[in-house]
């Protein structure tokens, strides 16, 4: 409960604008219970980052490793799912990792390495998906291409998410999706996916933090 409420608040307000009392008011948990679980707001923030990373990694793995679909279709299906999540909350919530990146000069130094490691993991997942175009034996040049395209994806996608939140509209997401897929399809020498396919696949539920259960009991 504590960690989930913290993620919800940070995806809307950011770390510096969220105080411990905001989390307590959202959960009804006492301050004593909070400090039983976490020694400081910084430690709480580290738990939120880890929690969100586990959740989002599972979401990426769900869509990007779907062997029934070609690589660009998998990526489009992920973007469609992420867009739906933003629409569900009327664009009030963005990406926790991207939000913290915008606060990089004012958040605790301990967060920086965590954020970089998570982002590198996301880039590796997208690169692995794109490399399936050249399976089973991609060349070193193809690996470099897919690595660069993966990094470009996250730089652009996080910017699109920010603009969508500012505009309360999906147009920035759609614009980035169209341009990225067109450019990437050309560089990989594959056809564009026509549209995101309706799917029975369901994004993973957010994990429950063990200390949160203890605090709520």
Image: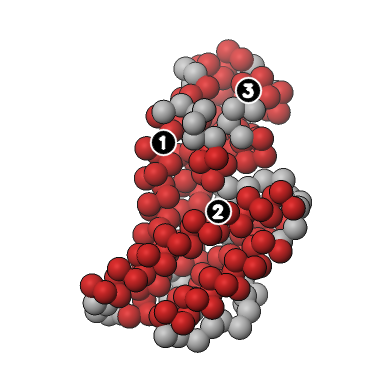
Point out residue 7 in the picture as x, y percentages from the top left corner. Answer: 59, 38
Point out residue 145 in the picture as x, y percentages from the top left corner. Answer: 34, 71
Q: Which residue is mark 1?
A: 112
Q: Circle 3 — which element?
A: loop
Q: Earlier in the sequence, mark 2 or mark 3?
A: 3
Q: CA distance from mark 2 to mark 3?
A: 25 Å
**Front-most of 181 and 29?**
181
Q: Is residue 88 visible?
A: no
149 left or right of 21?
Answer: left
**Residue at 38% across, 52% down:** 120
**Front-most of 53 and 115?**
115
Q: Earlier in the sequence, mark 2 or mark 1?
A: 1
Q: Is residue 141 visible?
A: yes
Q: Which residue is mark 3?
A: 19
Q: Residues within 10 Å of mark 1 (few under 14, many from 20)?
A: some
Q: Residues within 10 Å of mark 3 (few under 14, many from 20)?
A: some
Q: On the image, which quarter does residue 28 sit in?
A: top right
Q: Residues within 10 Å of mark 2 (few under 14, many from 20)?
A: some
**Front-most of 202 and 149?**
149
- Quarter in which the C terminus is drawn: top right
- Quarter in which the N terminus is drawn: top right
**Residue at 61% across, 21% down:** 20
**Residue at 49% across, 18% down:** 40
Q: Circle 1 — which element?
A: helix
**Front-most of 199 and 75?**
75
Q: On the image, which quarter does residue 25 sit in?
A: top right
**Is there CB contact under 8 Å for labels 2 and 1?**
no
115 over 132 or under it: above or below: above
Q: Which residue is mark 2?
A: 158
């Amino acid at each position: 409960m504590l960690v989930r409420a913290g993620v919800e608040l940070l995806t809307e307000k950011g770390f510096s604008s969220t105080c411990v009392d905001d989390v307590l008011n959202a959960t009804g948990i006492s301050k004593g219970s909070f400090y039983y679980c976490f020694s400081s707001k910084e430690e709480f923030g580290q738990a939120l980052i880890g929690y969100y990373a586990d959740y989002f990694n599972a979401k990426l793995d769900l869509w990007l490793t779907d062997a029934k679909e070609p690589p660009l279709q998998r990526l489009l299906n992920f973007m469609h799912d992420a867009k739906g999540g933003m629409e569900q909350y009327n664009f009030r919530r963005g990406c926790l990792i991207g939000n913290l990146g915008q606060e990089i000069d004012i958040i605790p130094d301990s967060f920086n390495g965590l954020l970089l490691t998570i982002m590198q993991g996301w880039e590796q997942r997208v690169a692995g998906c794109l490399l399936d175009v050249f399976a089973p034996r991609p060349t070193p040049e193809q690996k470099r291409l897919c690595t660069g395209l993966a990094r470009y994806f996250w730089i652009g996608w996080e910017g699109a998410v920010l603009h969508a939140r500012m505009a309360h509209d999906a147009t920035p997401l759609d614009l980035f999706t169209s341009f990225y897929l067109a450019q990437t399809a050309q560089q990989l020498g594959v056809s564009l996916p026509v549209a995101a396919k309706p799917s029975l696949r369901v994004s993973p539920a957010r994990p429950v933090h063990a200390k949160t259960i203890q605090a709520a009991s």
